[in-house]
Amino acid sequence: MNNINSNQVSRGVEVSSKFFCSMAYNKNLEEQMEFNKDKHYLGTLCKYNHEYKDTGMSLRYKSNGHNCVECLVIYGKKRRIENKDNMKEYLHDYYKKNKEHHKIQCKLWSKKNKKKIIEMRQTYYKKNKEKIYKLSTQWKKDNPEKLKEMNKRYSLKHKEEINKRSKDWGLKNKERMCFLTKRWKENNPEKHKIIQKKAYTKIRSTLKGKINHRMSASVRQSLIKGKNGYRWESLVGYTAKDLEKHLESLFTKEMSWKLFMDGGIHIDHKIPISVFNFNSYNDIDFKRCWALSNLQPLLAKDNLIKHDKIYKDFQPSLCIGVKL
């Protein structure tokens, strides 16, 4: 009654006190040897002399046959070592039968022991750095599709965080960023074209983007040497918003921005570009040509009919290279 019963001891042949003592002081034992007045009491010393904190007595369970706590912990560990394979099978079968219950218990334990889990992971990682790196590298080689899917899910979930981190790094490492971007474009010309096309399509799907695109292309085409890297707004002297307001003020009943976005309305020059006399954005006629007063919204079908026709007398500038 006071000690481990005879059946338990007889299974392990003769187990010496030395064996018990060599396994006694481990983390699991220390945790279970904490005195709990609801579960434990101090009783007579067991036959293996497991003394509890120099009291001359053994820590015993109130239930469970009043056995010595230390004896049962050590015996349990010994049994697990002896029956390692059987334990694996038993645990495997138990997990299969109690999957949902196991998941619930794991979640509850994880919530209560967050700090402990982090410490355990950090400790394990420090001890097994090389092993983890090798296994991780090998897994990535063996599972490229899974890795791709995982990265995709992570990117979608942490989109804002990734963009911010990337932007901050770019601002701190401008030269490096330029070099990497340039090298990537050179090595991936086809991919770069596809990405550019997607970006332009996205920009042109907005009203401001559509106006910017049309004006930029039109201004560039009207100049022999192009815009030299300038934005069209800085050349004509008004913004996309100003142009939007001006065009909307001239809309007829059948006109709308939806129709404009679909290509049913053109930005027309009342006096056609072809009759103006300019070679650069510094010439007098360039400003006259692209002035708001010379621009109007016109239905696509009407603009095709109108083409380059001029309906009133117009005198182009005779001076080229003279600033307005």
Image: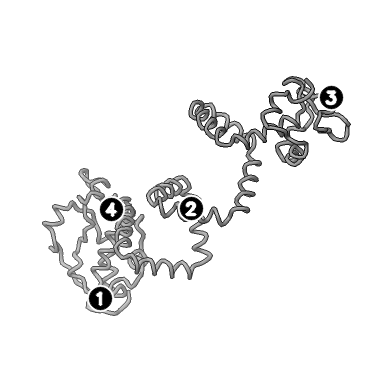
- Residue 93 seen by the camera: yes
Spot occupied by residue 225 in the image (x, y as percentages of width and height): 27, 75
Tell which circle, 4 or 2, labels the residue nearer the N-terminal end: 2
Say what amino acid the circle numbered 3 marks. Answer: Gly
Q: Nearer the viewer, residue 138 or 188?
A: 138
Query: What residue would you read off at disc 4?
Result: 247
Say what amino acid the circle numbered 2 marks. Answer: Ile
Residue 43's label in the rendered image is 3
Tell which circle, 3 or 4, labels the residue nearer the N-terminal end: 3
Query: What residue would you read off at disc 2?
Result: 162
Tell which circle, 1 or 4, labels the residue nearer the N-terminal end: 4
Residue positioned most to the front: 13
Tell which circle, 2 or 1, labels the residue nearer the N-terminal end: 2
Q: The residue tagged with tag 2: helix, strand or loop?
A: helix
Q: Image height check: is 63 above or below 171? A: above
Say what amino acid the circle numbered 4 marks. Answer: Leu
